[in-house]
Image (tube, rainbow, N blue to C red):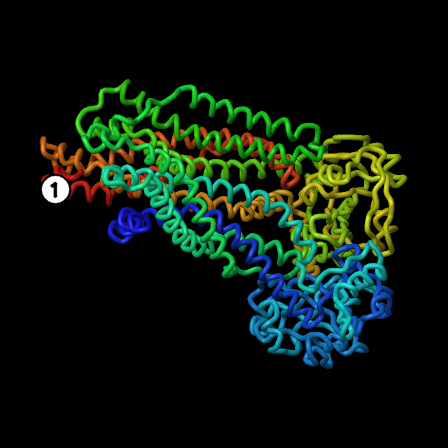
Amino acid sequence: MIRAIGILDLRRLAAVRLRTVIAVVAVAAGSSLALSVVVVSSSVTSSLTSFGQKLAGVAPLRVVGADTSGGLEQKVLSEVSGTPGVAVAVPVVQVATVVRSNDGKDVRVVALGLDCRAGAVVGQAACSSRTAASETSGPPLVSAALAKTLGPSSWVESATGTVPLAHRQVAPALDHFNGGAVVVFALAEAQALFDRAGRLDAIYVLPARSVSVTKLEARLRRSVGSWNGVLAATDPPPQLSVALDAITPLLILLAVLASGIAAVLVYNVVDLSLEQRRREHAIAAAVGAPPTVIVAGPLIEAGLLGAVGGVLGAAAGGLLAAPTVHSMSSYSTQLLGVTISVHTSPITYLIGLLLGTGIALVAAIRPVRRASRLDVAAELSGRDRRVEQRRALSPARGLALVVVAVLGLVGSWAAQRHGALESWQPGAATIAFLACVFATVLAIAFWAPAAIRILLERRRWKGVGGLAVANLVREPGRTGVVAVAIASSVGVALMTASFNSSVHSAIAQSLARSPQRDSVLVTTAAGYNGFNVDGRVPAASAQAVRRLPGVQKVDELRAVLAGHEGGQLVAVETADDLSGGPTLDVGKADESDYERGEVMVGPALARRLHLSGGSRFALDTPSGNVSVVVEGVWDNGDVTGENVTMTPAMLDRIYGSQLPSAIWLVPARGVAPSQLVSRAASAHLAPDLKFLTPQQFLADNSSSVSAQLAPFWALQRALLLVSFVSVLSTLLLAGLQRRRELGLLAAVGLTPRGLFYMVVVESLVVGAVAAVFGMAMGAFDMASLIQVVPLLVGYHDPYEFDAASLIVYVPLAIAVALVASLWPGWRTSRLRVVEALQYE
């Protein structure tokens, strides 16, 4: 059997190079989309682990506080140091901030506060004159790489204002830390500069000799209290989960969709390949080859092709992952000052090998089963041709797929009703969305050939056009596969562009309803619209903007990111009152109860902790757990819905006095926001302050959202490549399979130019029909996506249909199909008629 498999299947991998290359490329193109998600995960893990290892040195554990911005009280250092088994406890201040470079650009960096105790874990180089425990002033340490970008007027931003870097000290050893994007202060100075008086960000712990790390971790947990956390030194910072929780579910959906498309491509290649070898398999069966040869051989062949394609897909996945990694890096630099770079590990290639093999084997099952039921006598006598085996399209199947798609849409709508406060609703909404997407994709595979059949029957096609359309109708499976690939690229483009428009509209509507609709937003350079909780507005700057002519009042935005476990962080925000707030889902929104200390919570937090009006739950604070009463659950999507809103006085009471992360300047009557911005520029206030009118704020947020959609645009570009591969591979393999038929056409007078045009017209017709179905798919699936997004990222967006995107992406998809048909058309036009007529 092994020899038979080698002769019938494996030997042909080298002999039929074109089919082998097409199969490998098909697997690589499809699996690369899914593997890009693996590369993103690997990049985040690798970058943060490297950062943690270099900061921690030999220390295996770190203690973090009840909130992410200086959440450890100073007394915790004594408690950690006094824990049995602790050899050294190293206090650290770690802040995400910005440095103004020589060319006026803001470079996001990590600012560290260290003392000589750090030398015990990262080496004595950390103990310099600048990090001595007693020192509280002087020039900071910067890396040699960062120093090259600095000039006489450069500064680093702090919570007290800008700190000049004209007299910095250069430490080349810092170039290996965070790519050189680091500034080091003495510990006491960092505490004073970054609003951490009596507080720390982390304590790195080095165990005594022969002390078990696991046992020491348990002791530390008892020592520091449940409101503080004990993590491995290399564990990613918990606050990064804010970004990951929003984008990971969407990336997983992309991976599932990409794997499905890859399977369809491989199915097409394997199906046509087996059809091409029907006579060979019939001869093998006639001379006594066991049925397992017909089954095992093609499966082994498909598995090998899938394995090679999966490895190549892993390499391509690194390229596709770059936009997503860049988006994740923008988050991490804003939150942590840490840069994330693309990293493809050996495990990625192993996953690619397994994924490619699995996709190929799954895709090959149905064609192999059909080939195993071969009628040997009929095939050898020429009575069992492919044309005779094609089944008519079943309208019932097509209608069933449409029904499933509609049910998926209805299910995604039902699963997010009433605020989606039940724990089952997010999972149900995701399943409904996936059902909707896959049903629409499979429906296209059915209805596109049906539409072309109707086109053939309604219009009298003549000549080359008639032959091309007849070929598409005669091969509905092949036509459906190509249509799915082309339609997917159009549908994803429409969905991405429409989602971008939806988010823009949602932000505009939210701003129009808010009390700040005519106000000016003031942030620091590091603040990024208040997103970075370390980017606080200094008290002196806040007083200066209050004194600007034309300012009626000031609304401060203050927030704390509470918690110490990824996936369980809570944004604790403030609001002076509840007027103009989000829609109420459960409970009440009574101003008097709110003033007495009751709080409003977001839907995701309510769902996770099963909260409703009157419920109690505990918030982690630096001084311990504080129990609060829920007044109501409202539709606030901040931090994916994991948020608490309370009065400013209550926030100060339980978390201590907090500098604002942003300020809204409410102009006096008759003063336009643009006038306030002009007056601020004329006043020459702090150089790190940013002033945004409502229009600029809207544009800034919309630009940020557009950057976050980079993974979807990467998917769309990849799908264009997939559609190119699909059209190319299908037409090439079909040309090999139909050589005898093409020879007959040439023999009866069809010119080489006619053969070429016949192939090109096939691609144009299926491309045009697929583009129309792609528009329908994008519009339909967008309706389902809009229902699911609030459960994934927290915010509700209106349905928008971006018709303008179709002007670009419909012609582009058709052009890709046309270009992909040129080589198959050229090969067909050079057909040798005598050889083709002899082809079996």
Q: Taking 131 as reference, is 791 above or below it?
A: above
Seen as rendered, the residue at the extreme front is: 288
Answer with the quarter of the image where residue 85 lies: bottom right
Picture quadrant where residue 121 is located: bottom right
Q: Is residue 478 left or right of residue 537?
A: left
Residue on which disc 1 sits? 835
Q: Nearer the viewer, residue 769 or 284?
A: 284
> Depth check: 279 or 529 in front?
279
Q: Is residue 702 left or right of residue 293?
A: right
Residue 572 coordinates in the image, percent (x, y): 77, 47
Q: Position of residue 78 (x, y in %)?
A: 86, 68
Q: Is residue 809 visible?
A: no
Q: Amino acid at mark 1?
A: Glu
Badge 1: how crowded within 10 Å, few (<14), some, or many (20+)?
Answer: few
In what element is the residue under mark 1? helix
The answer to which of 169 and 748 lies nearer the viewer is 748
**Which percent across, then down, holds residue 738?**
21, 36
737 relative position to 149: left or right: left
Which residue is the extreme one toward the right?
Answer: 596
Work out whether residue 787 can be spotted.
Answer: yes
Q: Residue at x 67, y 69 (%)?
A: 55
Quadrant placement of the C terminus: top left
Residue 261 in picture, x, y percent from top left = 43, 40
